[in-house]
Amino acid sequence: MTNPTLKILACCHKQPTSNDLLINMLNSNKKLYPIFLGNNCNNIASINNRIVYHDNVGDNISYLNPHINEFTGIYWAWKNYDKLDNPEYIGFCHYRRFFNINDINELLNNTNIKCLSICQSFTNSFNLGWFFLFQQDVKFTHIRIKLLEQVLSNEEFELFLNGMCKISSNIVPFSNNMFIMKKEEFFKYCEWMHPKVINMYNILYNNQQNDYYINDKTGKRYVGYITELLTMFYLWKTFYIKNNNSILLKNVIQDLS
């Protein structure tokens, strides 16, 4: 059996130094490729002889990166998939957070998975959905709930409140916008996500007089933070509650410096 083709894009916004974890991971993982987001480091064409991608060429929304974070890279891969040589699987991770997999090819071959993501285990006293909704200030809590109510269908919003937010004593996708998906599943995810992300952006930032607008460093990235929650919700409702050819990894390699 031939190995499935796979590219994992590591989202970056600055040139790595020789001591960065990204360099070590590039040396050990031939499936990993940097992608620079938000019109950054345009002069870099390769790192350690590995081709580098940029989210500001072709069909792109790179200018939105200060507000929607990694999703500009996800959008770019979706709309410019041929520039990635059309891999059977596509993955995303961060420049300081990587999948801890010794042999990805063996994993994909043996399981024929549709989706692979990281996970977190929670006890009865801790609830993932409510953690994401209420982990920060009251203002952002209100924004999250109101935005989710506006961008999700009535059925999805009810599923979120009555299902996902009541998860306890379980293992659930805790994605941080990290995943590996089959191409077809990745396109479905992007088709579901994109209008919601743009809708949230328009609600928050096109009318600076609305109740949601906050002009500070955190406020400018609210949509980006909520995309992580939406990705987690999508993975949960699409794959994990259905046991739909999916795998959850229990740890990642990350640089906490």
Image: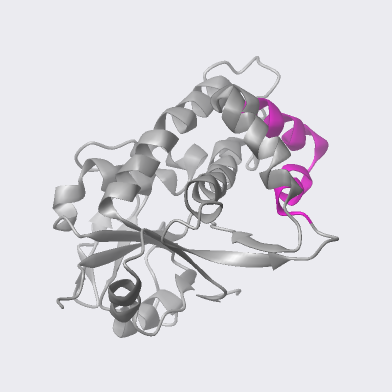
Which contiguous range is marked in magenta?
A: 127-148
Of the pair 253 and 116, the residue shown nearer to us: 116
Residue that extends furthest to the right in the rendered view of this protein: 125
Front-lying residue, 31 or 22? 31
116 relative to 123 in the view: left or right:
left
- Asked if residue 129 lies in the magenta stretch, the reply is yes
**Is 71 displayed left or right of 209 in the figure?**
left
Does residue 122 appear in this view?
yes
Identify the image quadrant of residue 210. top right
Query: Where in the figure is residue 34, as x and y percent of width and height?
Result: 31, 64
Query: Eyeballing the image, is 8 above or below 213?
Result: below
Residue 253 spot, x, y in % from top left? 51, 77
Q: In the depicted view, which residue is nearer to us: 182 or 6?
A: 182
Q: At 58% across and 65% down in the image, what residue appears?
A: 119
Magenta residues: mostly which secondary structure? helix
Quarter where residue 45 is shown: bottom left
Report whether residue 215 is seen.
no
Depth check: 32 or 127 in front?
Answer: 127
21 relative position to 73: left or right: right
Q: How is the image coloured?
A: one colour
Instruction: From this view, report whether residue 133 is shown above or below residue 5.
Output: above
Residue positioned 71% across, 19% down in the render: 211
Q: Is residue 111 above or below residue 141?
A: below
